[in-house]
Image (cartoon, grey):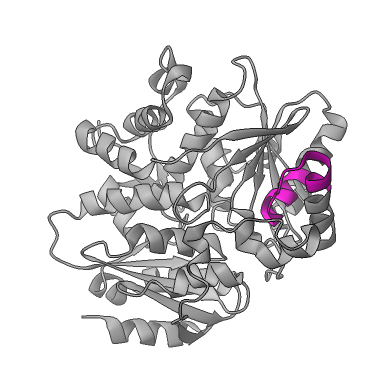
């Protein structure tokens, strides 16, 4: 039976894969969830620990999309998308870093963006209409999506990013590709960018005319590939190990993917959500009250989110019950001062160069181990430290971070971006101007 999807706002209505992926956001304002989650017996066949990363990723996606995508086509998609490594690096006793920055845009978003681009291409293979991909970014999502869709026939990408709140090299990844990629520099925060994207989807006339889809983690196709590397991390640990995964979190798509992986049989004992001062979810975990608020800028900018979209999916996975959520997830938050100290500490004591987001994760792992000293920790390192060169050199000194050529080459390119007010009317008017 083909996989179906329902909205978190109306559980009794189901859509197929094409509707869920290409329309991204249900008209009722909820988020799509899979109607059937494959269990461990369907995913983790005997000998799974010996599978290659590509084979592991294919088997997971096959169990999820069975009946919706032909096996041969799915294997080809996964093979093209997941063609780089995610090594687990040990930096101390019980402390491991899962490096997720070895893809084209040097961020973990490459896993989801590359798979989603290929899945969307397959879903629209017989369509004549151009697909407009909207994406809001707090740093890394936009670069990964722009890279994944750049010059892909039949697509146009519109990236919204908050002015002055992404790093210089992150901004160059968004604004220098051209061709079918348009960057909008929004005078506001990431939450404003996300709000504008949602407004476009809820505008039925524009959504239909522009054939809109989203590449943010509101899109269910972004989440599944992020489950791949949780299983891959487990492969790289001793078989009996059930680690604690520490997830630097902003919009909480990455942590949601981990929770989906757990449903599919991931060996894990607990999840730790690590945030900067934008601590809406850690506050909820402590108090049981969810209170979104405007985000504050930090040096771990990809986590500067005050109203994380995927929180509704986390609640949905746990029956809306706070007690069940805290049984699976704990939360810690840290400010920029502590983050800077962690960058220095990790560098001085282990020789490892960790980016600001990973440093927040390191602090959370250390905090967790105060009461659980024997736990094996896996910290998700979500972006290459060279993306945050200013901060890294301030803490570790000039030359401490090597800039990969695919990022260094962007420095001299001209930035091209459309200035945009953080008002729905201004954005919707602009979209109307590019509609057919």
Which secondary structure is most common in the magenta stretch?
helix
Q: In this view, does 397 lie to the left or right of 174?
A: right
* 41 relative to 110, above or below: above
For the C terminus, give its image quadrant: bottom left
Q: Where is residue 248 in the image (x, y as percent from the top left)?
A: 66, 49
Residues drawn in magenta: 345-362
Q: Which quadrant of the view contains residue 184?
A: bottom left
Which of 77 and 215 lies nearest the eye of the viewer?
A: 77
Q: Which quadrant of the view contains residue 177?
A: bottom left
Instruction: Say if residue 16 shows up in the picture.
Output: no
For the N terminus, give its image quadrant: top left
- Is 112 within the magenta? no
Q: Which quadrant of the view contains residue 375?
A: top right
User: Residue drawn at (72%, 60%), measured in percent from left and top?
Assistant: 392
Q: Where is residue 17 in the image (x, y as percent from the top left)?
A: 29, 46
Instruction: Say if residue 372 shows up in the picture.
Output: yes
- Is 351 within the magenta? yes
Which of 24 and 337 lies nearest the eye of the viewer?
A: 337
Q: Where is residue 180 in the image (x, y as percent from the top left)?
A: 30, 72
Residue reaching furthest to the front: 399
């Amino acid at each position: 039976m083909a996989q179906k999807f329902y909205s978190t706002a109306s559980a009794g209505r189901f859509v197929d894969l094409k509707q869920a992926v290409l329309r991204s956001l249900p008209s009722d304002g909820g988020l799509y969830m899979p109607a059937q989650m494959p269990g461990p017996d369907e995913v983790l066949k005997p000998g799974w620990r010996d599978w290659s990363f590509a084979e592991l990723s294919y088997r997971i996606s096959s169990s999820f999309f069975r009946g919706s995508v032909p096996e041969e086509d799915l294997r080809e998609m996964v093979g093209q998308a997941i063609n780089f490594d995610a090594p687990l690096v040990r930096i101390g006793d019980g402390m491991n870093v899962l490096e997720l920055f070895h893809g084209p845009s040097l961020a973990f978003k490459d896993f989801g963006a590359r798979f989603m681009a290929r899945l969307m291409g397959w879903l629209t293979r017989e369509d004549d209409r151009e697909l407009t991909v909207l994406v809001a970014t707090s740093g890394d999502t936009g670069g990964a999506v722009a890279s994944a869709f750049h010059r892909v026939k039949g697509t146009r990408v519109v990236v919204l990013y908050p002015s002055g709140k992404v790093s210089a090299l992150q901004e160059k990844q968004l604004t220098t590709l051209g061709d079918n990629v348009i960057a909008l520099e929004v005078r506001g925060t990431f939450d404003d960018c996300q709000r504008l994207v949602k407004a476009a989807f809820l505008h039925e006339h524009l959504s239909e005319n522009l054939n809109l889809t989203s590449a943010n983690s509101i899109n269910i196709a972004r989440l599944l590939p992020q489950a791949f590397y949780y299983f891959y991390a487990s492969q790289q640990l001793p078989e009996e190990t059930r680690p604690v995964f520490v997830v630097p979190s902003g919009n909480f798509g990455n942590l949601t993917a981990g929770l989906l992986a757990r449903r599919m049989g991931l060996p894990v004992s607990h999840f730790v959500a690590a945030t900067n001062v934008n601590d809406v979810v850690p506050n909820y975990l402590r108090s049981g009250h969810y209170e979104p608020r405007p985000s504050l800028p930090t040096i771990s900018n990809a986590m500067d989110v005050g109203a994380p979209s995927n929180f509704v999916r986390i609640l949905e996975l746990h029956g809306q019950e706070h007690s069940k959520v805290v049984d699976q997830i704990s939360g810690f938050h840290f400010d920029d001062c502590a983050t800077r100290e962690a960058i220095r500490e990790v560098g001085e004591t282990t020789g490892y160069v960790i980016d600001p987001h990973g440093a927040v994760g390191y602090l959370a792992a250390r905090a967790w181990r105060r009461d659980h000293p024997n736990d094996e920790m896996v910290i998700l390192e979500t972006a290459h430290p060279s993306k945050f060169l200013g901060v890294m050199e301030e803490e570790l000194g000039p030359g401490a971070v090597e800039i990969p050529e695919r990022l260094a080459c962007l420095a001299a390119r001209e930035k091209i971006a459309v200035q945009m007010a953080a008002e729905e009317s201004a954005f919707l008017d602009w979209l109307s101007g590019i509609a057919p």
